[in-house]
Structures are given as structure tokens and as C-alpha cells.
Image (tube, rainbow, N blue to C red):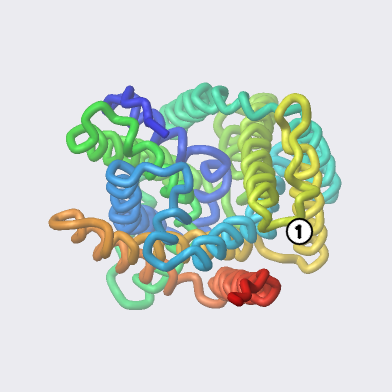
Amino acid sequence: MKYQKTLGPIQGMAMTVTTFVGTGLMLLPALSVTKAGAFSFYAWLITAFISLPIAFVFAFLGSRFPSAGGASHYIGKQFGETVERAVGWLFLSILLVGPTVAIKIAAAYLAVALNLDERYIFALSIATLLIMTLYALAGAENSSKAQVYIVILLILCVITLAWKGNLSAATTSIETPRDWLSWKTTLLSIGTIFWCFLGLEVMAHLGAEFKNPARDFPIALFGGMTIVVLLYLIVVLLVSYHHTYGDDLTNSQSLALLVGHLFGENTKRLFAGVAFIIAFTNVGMYLIGFARMVQTLAAKGALPSTFAPLSKKGSPTRAVILVSLVSLLSLLTFHYSDGAMSMLIEMTNGAFILIYGLTSITGLHLLKGKYRLFAVLACGSSLLVASFMGTNLLFALSAFLLAILFEHYKERKRRIHAPKIHVQ
């Protein structure tokens, strides 16, 4: 497959911002302030700094070894097909925790828009998932073009909030960590904040599409991530200064509460309605992506073939239904077990950081010269982020181990039942 070399630095920056700005902006700033308090500003800077080497490793691998398979393909080149397939399963395991966070965010903002209290959020979550299922079944994947307009809308909202919310005064809420206890508080929030940078693997697909990758891609990547971090830092400062953070419900509605505090009740409900549409579109794309992954695995024989067919419109109908049922099971499980949002986020992060770590190790072998230095730094970054996730990393490790054992079992079964050739 030939990649179209059409991107310049400006387009690349826009695509980078589109990749990292979404539902995270509606939750992560408040969640980080809840966990790190006045030190959250530095926690964001540190997380962005340690994420950059991982992003560059994906960029370099993508420009030198372009492949639609992305991370799993690179890992397979180094560790073999069994691990490559296990990584595919690891991506799929994220379905058990990841969509639940985004669906709950969407439902929380819908509750604000409809002026309903928290008793209704679970029912709204189920209703949101049902509507998203119908959206995915309709084959709405082409709506990904709307992502650009969504990002522009969010940026304009943040700029308006910065103006109305007195950003210069909000900078007084920044506090510098000065002792081990404050540094520990700062660093432990990295395990949650890293959710903002999920999607680094997309960089592998962008790298080969630049007219001059060696010159333009670093500019686009660094410039785009700088804009992303600035947007999040603005919201962090405003949320902290105006005290729109706290428990899970407050954090889930933090941006709407901030808008209400600055512009009044009617504007808050209007903004919450727009935020719901934004979150709905993001999560809808999320579910469609997972359904495509299920359909691809089924077509390759890794999953039952019943999930392989496509509808007349090209939609993976059966895969969409399976993904929605798993998401429903996840919602029910975490609702009745009172699972915290931060736990769900860090479980999702754990799966991604394991994939990023394996890709960084692969970069040590595939990248040469000065580019290998980025792979070394990326390995260190992956290990550092993983160390701040604690027991929530066990989800990813368990899923990956089970996937490897399952793939070994399939391979052994295939060898046993393979036809034997007898030479007379």
C-alpha cells in the first residue's frame, strides 16, 4: 500500500490536535486537580514531557516501516506472530473498561442538559449506549470528518472560558512541589493524566504521509502536542481556580459547571448539550473502531467467523452488536461495584502503556543511529508511567498473558491436527 505524501507541518499539527483533544478535556483536568491539587499543573507538564519520546518512536517507525497494522505489526517483527496476535487481543481487551468511561462522561453532560440529578445518570448511560449502537449500525463511520469541527469548537470554548474566567488570576493556583510528599502526590497523578495521550500509536500512520517527513513531522508533532497541552493546562487552571472539581460526578460535569459558574444556568445547559453531542460522536467512533477490529479478527480466523460478515452498507453489524453487549456488561459491572472513574482510566492506560512499552523495545532494534536514542527514552517513559499505575496495571498484564497462552494453545492444536505426510 502506498501512502499519499500530502501533509505539511500545519496539517500535521491539526491532525495531532484532533487525535488528542476530545472527551478527555471534559474530565481529566478536574480529575487531575482532585488527585494532585495545586501541583496538577506540573503533573501535566511532566506527563507531556515523558510522552513525547513514545510519540516520536511511533513517528519514526511509521515513516520508515509504513504498515496499516501499526503497533501490533512492529511488535510482531521483533517478538513473532504469537505476540503480535496477543497485542491485537490486548487492544480488544480495552473494550472491557475504556468505553465505559466515555459513555459515563456523555451521560453526565446529558443529565446537566436535561436538568436531571445523578440518580438518572446510569439510565442515561444505558440509553446513550443504545443510541450509539444504532448510530454504529447505520454505518456512520464517515462522520469522522466531523472530528475537525468538534476540535475547533472545543478550542473556541476553551479560549472563551480563559477570557471570562480570568486566566491570569487563575495562575495563582499553581504550586511548585518542594518536598518528597508533594512530588509523590504530583507523580502519582501521571497514571491518570496519561489518558489524554492515548492515541500515540496513530502517529505511526501519519509519519509516512508527510511530504518531507524528516523536516515536517517533528515540527507537526511537537507543535500539535504543545497546543494540546496548553488547552488542557488552561482548563486545569480554571477548574482549580473556580473549584469545579471534587467527586466523580462533579469531575464528570466539570466543564459544564465551569460554564455555569461563569455564564449562568441557561448557558450551562446549552453547553452541556453541545458537550454531549461531542462526547457522543467521539464514543460512537470509538465503538465503530472496536467493531472493525472484531470484524478483522473474525475474518482472519482469530474470532468466530459469525462476526466477519459486513452489511450491504459495509457496516460490521454483528461485530457492532457484540461490542455493544460487552460495553453494556462493563457498564453494569462497574455501576453495581461502585468502580471509580480513575480506576477505569488507569486500567485502560495500563493496556496502552504495555503496548507502547513493547513498541519502544522494538524501536531499539528497528531504529538506527540517533533515532535509537528516542527508543531508549521511550522505554524509560513507558516504565515510568507504568510504575504510577499500581495494581491497575494488573488488568493489562493479565489480559496479555491470557492472550499469549490462548495463542500458544491454538498453535499447538493446529500442529496436532495438521495432516501428516507419509513418505513411502
| Residue beneath the point at 71% across and 48% down | 104
Residue type at the position of mark 1: Ser
Q: Residues within 10 Å of mark 1 (few under 14, many from 20)?
A: some
| Residue beneath the point at 61% across and 77% down | 424
In the displayed structure image, the side of residue 34 where residue 120 appears, left or right: right
In the displayed structure image, the side of residue 148 where residue 325 appears, left or right: right
Q: Position of residue 422 (x, y in %)?
A: 62, 75
Q: Nearer the viewer, residue 381 or 363?
A: 363
Q: Quadrant of residue 356?
A: bottom left
| Residue beneath the point at 27% across and 58% down | 366
Q: Nearer the viewer, residue 159 or 223?
A: 223
Q: Position of residue 271 (x, y in %)?
A: 63, 28
Query: Which residue reaches farthest left?
Result: 369
Q: Is residue 8 above or below residue 389?
A: above
Q: Is residue 395 visible?
A: no
Q: Kindly state the secondary structure of the residue where label 1 is placed.
A: helix
The number of numbered badges drawn on the structure is 1
Q: Is residue 401 above or below residue 49?
A: below
Q: Position of residue 317 (x, y in %)?
A: 78, 37
Q: Is residue 72 above or below residue 400?
A: above
In the displayed structure image, the side of residue 42 where residue 86 appears, left or right: right
Q: Nearer the viewer, residue 121 or 219?
A: 219
Q: Which residue is mark 1?
A: 330
